[in-house]
Each structure stands twice: as structure tokens, then as C-alpha cells.
Image: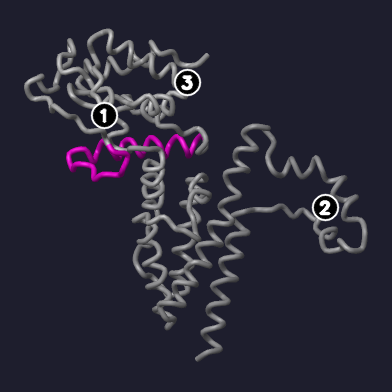
């Protein structure tokens, strides 16, 4: 059973009485209510009607529905004398979070990252995050006007887990160490890799920090900045491409209760049958050999091959 108009009105009413929604401020529009609570537009319209009937909301032509300046019980808001005569609709654009609210913004992002880490990105919603941090949805939207803005902040928060540390060896040793650390970040946040675009990269501050470090490390080897940038894309794509396999496998195991090894074991007879002809001799040699795909090992081997290729090319051109 979906959320009723009375339940949504009760949540907004509580925010008004708590001073989270102040006199003269915009209430969520009917369209915003339908998106946040996943209800029909008719239900959203009844929410506004309920609040108007209680004297808590009032329509403003050309603007929308706002908290009434005489809302009974509203605390911490402005008086009707101080309320703006023509309140402006809050725009859904990302705005700088006031310094005093940085801790609250970080708490919101940390909660969102925890939800995605444990339950997957599909379990994430603005309403779910608001409930976890014990905050009204309208308040949450003041910090992050949409789930897209929140996801951007989540990606930055997750990538801030990456740290290059000090330069402790050759450029080759440091390059491998830094990318192993990137793999650890992807391992810790399985939802992260699928959200990152390579062809149209998001300008995530922490991702730019990583790119700068890789390019600077490669230029230590005598590679031009242009070639270092392209090499960075190849190395990053290898890590991201391997990491994309993490979340589906975790989800499949959670749903079925069957891990990858068991899944293969249950289909070993079929695999042997399919690989029995001479055209599949290489695959047949693996079946029953004890080989099992290990993503950590696969990534490590791929990384070593790519870095060794860079090293060999440099050796040939000098």
C-alpha cells in the first residue's frame, strides 16, 4: 500500500512546526511530491489541499504553494511582517553549502554511501537517506536538490578514500601501488565503478586529484603529458572495467545464496559437454584443473601487464 496524502501532509506539518520549513518558504511542488514519495499527482494535490485547510499553506499565483506566514505552532520562522511578499521557487541547481552546514552535508553523504555499499545503488533514494539521518525530505533537498547531485557527492566521497601516500620507489612501483589503492576503493564501494563515466567523465574533485597524480607519476618516466593522459585513461579503464563485475556478482549471490564457485560447479557437466570438440581445446584444459576466476588476481595480472608494457616501450624508445 502506498503512502497516503494524510501521511505526507503529516510529515510536512511536522517540518513546519519544527521550523524546518519556515513561513514564506516553498513547499515541495506536486511534481516533487510525486517523485519523492512515489505517489500519483492526485495524491500530491490533496497534500496541498490538506495543509491549506489547516491554515499551514497558502497558494501564491505564479510561484506555487508556500508555508503560510500565520502557520500556527511554527517555530524558528519569520513573522508575517518579515516574510517576503513574493517568495521565489527554490531552483534545482547545486549551490555551495554554507560552511556551518558542512558537517550536516557530510553526514548525509556518509549515510548515502553506507546504504549503497551494503544494499546496492538501487536501494538508494532521497527519502531513504532522509529517514536514516532523521531529517525531513525538504531539509535534505536544501543540501542536495536532486538524487543526481547527491550521487555526485557520493562519488567524490568514495574516491576520497584513495590516497597515494608518499613517493617510495620508482615511477613503476609507485604507479602500481597507486592503482592497487584504486582497486581497494572500488572493492570497498562496489556501486562506484558503474557510476563513473569515461567517455564523458564527471568533474568529481577527487577523481581529478587521482588523474593529476597518475599523470605526474608517468611524467617522471619521461612520458609527455599528452601520452600520460591517454595512459591514465587506459589504466583507469582497466580498473573500472574489472570493478564493474563486483556489484552484479554481490547482488546475484545475495539474491540466490549461491556464490560464483558453486554456480560453476553446478554447471560443470554442461561446460564439459560444450567444450568437448577440438575447437575448444584451450577451454577444456581449464575445466577440472582447479582454476577459478579471482577478480583480485585478474586485476593484479592485468595491471602488471599494462605497466610492464609501458616500461618496455620506454626501454625501446631510449
Nearest the viewer among 148 and 157 is 148
Mark 2 vs mark 3: in front: 3
Q: Does the magenta stretch include residue 317?
A: no
Q: Which mark is residue 288?
A: 2
**Judging from the image, what secondary structure is the residue with disc 3 in?**
loop
Nearer-N-terminus badge (2/3)? 3
Q: Point out residue 134 in the picture as x, y percentages from the top left corner.
A: 32, 24
Label 2 sits on a secondary structure element that is loop
Q: Which mark is residue 40?
A: 3
Please provide percent x and percent y for residue 183: 50, 56
User: x and y percent of residue 211 in the render?
Assistant: 40, 65
Q: Report which quarter residue 46 is drawn in.
A: top left
C-alpha distance separating marks 1 and 3: 23 Å
- Of residues 268 and 71, the one nearer the viewer is 71
Closest to the camera, between mark 1 and mark 3, is 1
Residue 167 versus residue 98 in the image, above or below: below
Name the outermost residue toward the left.
81
Q: SS class of the residue under badge 1?
A: loop
Image location (x, y in percent) of residue 227: 46, 77
Q: Which residue of the protein is positioned furthest toward the bottom in this rendering? A: 318
Residue 94 lies in magenta, yes or no?
Answer: yes
The outermost residue toward the front is: 61
The relative height of residue 128 versus residue 179 in the rendered view (above or below) is above
The reply to whether callout 1 and callout 3 are in contact (CB within 8 Å) is: no
Residue range in magenta is 91-119
Q: Mark 1 points at which residue?
A: 62
Amino acid at each position: 500500500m502506498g503512502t497516503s496524502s494524510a501521511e505526507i501532509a503529516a510529515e510536512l506539518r511536522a517540518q513546519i512546526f519544527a521550523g524546518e520549513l519556515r513561513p514564506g518558504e516553498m513547499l515541495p511542488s506536486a511534481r516533487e511530491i510525486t517523485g519523492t514519495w512515489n505517489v500519483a499527482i492526485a495524491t500530491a494535490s490533496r497534500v496541498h489541499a490538506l495543509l491549506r485547510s489547516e491554515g499551514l499553506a497558502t497558494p501564491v499565483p505564479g510561484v506555487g504553494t508556500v508555508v503560510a506566514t500565520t502557520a500556527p505552532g511554527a517555530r524558528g520562522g519569520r513573522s508575517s511582517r518579515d516574510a517576503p511578499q513574493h517568495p521565489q521557487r527554490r531552483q534545482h541547481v547545486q549551490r555551495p553549502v554554507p560552511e556551518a552546514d558542512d558537517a550536516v552535508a557530510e553526514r548525509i553523504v556518509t549515510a548515502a554511501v553506507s546504504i549503497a555499499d551494503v544494499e546496492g545503488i538501487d536501494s538508494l533514494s532521497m527519502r531513504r537517506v532522509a529517514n536514516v539521518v532523521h531529517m525531513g525530505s525538504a531539509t535534505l533537498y536544501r543540501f542536495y536538490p536532486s538524487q543526481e547531485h547527491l550521487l555526485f557527492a557520493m562519488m567524490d566521497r568514495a574516491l576520497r578514500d584513495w590516497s597515494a601516500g608518499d613517493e617510495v620507489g620508482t615511477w613503476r612501483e609507485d604507479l602500481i601501488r597507486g592503482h592497487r589503492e584504486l582497486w581497494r576503493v572500488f572493492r570497498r564501494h562496489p556501486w562506484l565503478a558503474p557510476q563513473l563515466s569515461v567517455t564523458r567523465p564527471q568533474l568529481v574533485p577527487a577523481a581529478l586529484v587521482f588523474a593529476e597524480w597518475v599523470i605526474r607519476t608517468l611524467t617522471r618516466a619521461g612520458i609527455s603529458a599528452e601520452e600520460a593522459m591517454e595512459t591514465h585513461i587506459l589504466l583507469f579503464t582497466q580498473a573500472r572495467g574489472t570493478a564493474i563485475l563486483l556489484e552484479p556478482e554481490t547482488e546475484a549471490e545475495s539474491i540466490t545464496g549461491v556464490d560464483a564457485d558453486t554456480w560453476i560447479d553446478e554447471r560443470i557437466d554442461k561446460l564439459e559437454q560444450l567444450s568437448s570438440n577440438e575447437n575448444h581445446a584451450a577451454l577444456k584444459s581449464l575445466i577440472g584443473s582447479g582454476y577459478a576466476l579471482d577478480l583480485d588476481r585478474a586485476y593484479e595480472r592485468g595491471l602488471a601487464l599494462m605497466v610492464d608494457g609501458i616500461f618496455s616501450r620506454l626501454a625501446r624508445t631510449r
